[in-house]
Image (cartoon, helix red, strand yellow):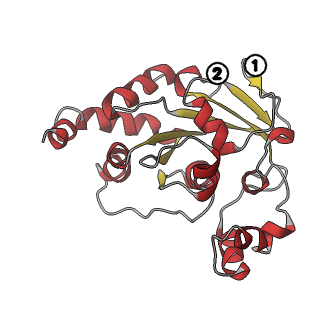
């Protein structure tokens, strides 16, 4: 299934307002792919996702990743001492102590320092290279059909969501799906809600590209019964 077809199906079945976003991590030693315009100014990872869902096709090199918290998780830069110590997030008022904030940073999954030199993001339909992760922004009802429903449709059981008070887009929706190969969802975070136009009722789902076709196949089955039935009041 090509990316354009996958995007159309996700938008149609789930009723998404915006396209899913394709995220590809450009590794050390790789060149940025053709067809992606380097952003003019500095940009946070979460901002790039929210701009891409509206149609932009972007290359964000290491030098233009504006958020050192996100960039350090992505392996682009070293974690600044104020972030590593918890001081930064404590000073934001998001934790009762620097120690509490430090425990969040210590627990976050990260990519090896220097392993990534930048990111390319675009609407899924405009992806020019295979994505590593597809980020979907939608309402809880829309994303419910991805996780837990599609994720448990064939294997059953329950799911565990991995999230924190910060780093909804970079860690929860990009790094965790990339590292684990499993879908993850996030309610958003202080950073993305302060820095982007994400609506109060919106949240994220991160789908590893390896599971995208499976998710769509299951959603197509659900679209003939459970989804429309649940939406009929």
Decide: few, some or many residues near mark 2? Use Cα within 10 Å; few <14, some 14-19, many ≥20: some
Q: Are marks 2 and 1 in contact (CB under 8 Å)?
A: yes
In the rendered image, which quarter contains the C terminus?
A: top left
- Front position in the image: 1 or 124: 124
Q: Which residue is mark 1?
A: 34
Q: Report whether residue 151 is seen.
A: yes
Q: Residue at x 75, y 73 (%)?
A: 86
- Front position in the image: 144 or 203: 203
| Picture layout, residue 128 above or below residue 142 | above
Q: Residue at x 53, y 63 (%)?
A: 163
Determine whether the residue tagged by mark 2 lies in a helix, strand or loop: loop
Determine whether the residue tagged by mark 1 lies in a helix, strand or loop: loop
Q: How many marks?
A: 2
Q: Report whether residue 131 is seen.
A: no
Q: Residue at x 49, y 20 (%)?
A: 4
Q: Percent from the top left, x then y, of residue 62?
A: 83, 41
Res. 136 mark: none
Res. 128 mark: 2
Q: Percent from the top left, x then y, of residue 63?
A: 87, 40
Label located before the other in sequence (2 or 1): 1
Q: Residue at x 41, y 23 (%)?
A: 8
Decide: few, some or many residues near mark 1? Use Cα within 10 Å; few <14, some 14-19, many ≥20: few
Q: Percent from the top left, x then y, of residue 217?
A: 34, 34
Which residue of the protein is positioned furthest toward the top in this rendering? 35
Left-right relation of 27 to 155:
right
């Amino acid at each position: 299934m090509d990316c354009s077809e996958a995007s159309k199906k996700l938008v149609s079945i789930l009723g998404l307002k915006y396209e899913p976003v394709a995220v590809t991590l450009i590794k050390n030693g790789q060149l940025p792919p053709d067809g992606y315009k380097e952003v003019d100014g500095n940009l946070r990872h979460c901002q790039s996702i929210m701009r891409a869902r509206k149609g932009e096709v972007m290359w964000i090199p290491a030098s233009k990743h504006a958020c050192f918290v996100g960039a350090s998780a992505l392996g682009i830069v070293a974690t600044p001492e104020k972030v590593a110590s918890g001081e930064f997030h404590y000073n934001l008022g998001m934790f009762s102590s620097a120690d509490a904030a430090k425990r969040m940073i210590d627990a976050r999954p990260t990519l090896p320092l220097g392993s990534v030199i930048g990111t390319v993001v675009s609407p899924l339909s405009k992806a020019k290279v295979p994505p590593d992760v597809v980020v979907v922004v939608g309402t809880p009802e829309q994303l419910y059909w991805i996780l837990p429903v599609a994720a448990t449709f064939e294997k059953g059981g329950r799911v565990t969501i991995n999230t924190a008070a910060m780093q909804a887009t970079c860690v929860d929706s990009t790094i965790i799906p990339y590292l684990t190969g499993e879908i993850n969802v996030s309610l958003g975070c202080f950073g993305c809600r302060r820095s982007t136009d994400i609506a109060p009722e919106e949240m994220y789902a991160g789908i590893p590209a390896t599971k995208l076709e499976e998710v769509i196949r299951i959603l197509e089955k659900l679209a003939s019964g459970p989804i429309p039935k649940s939406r009929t009041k």
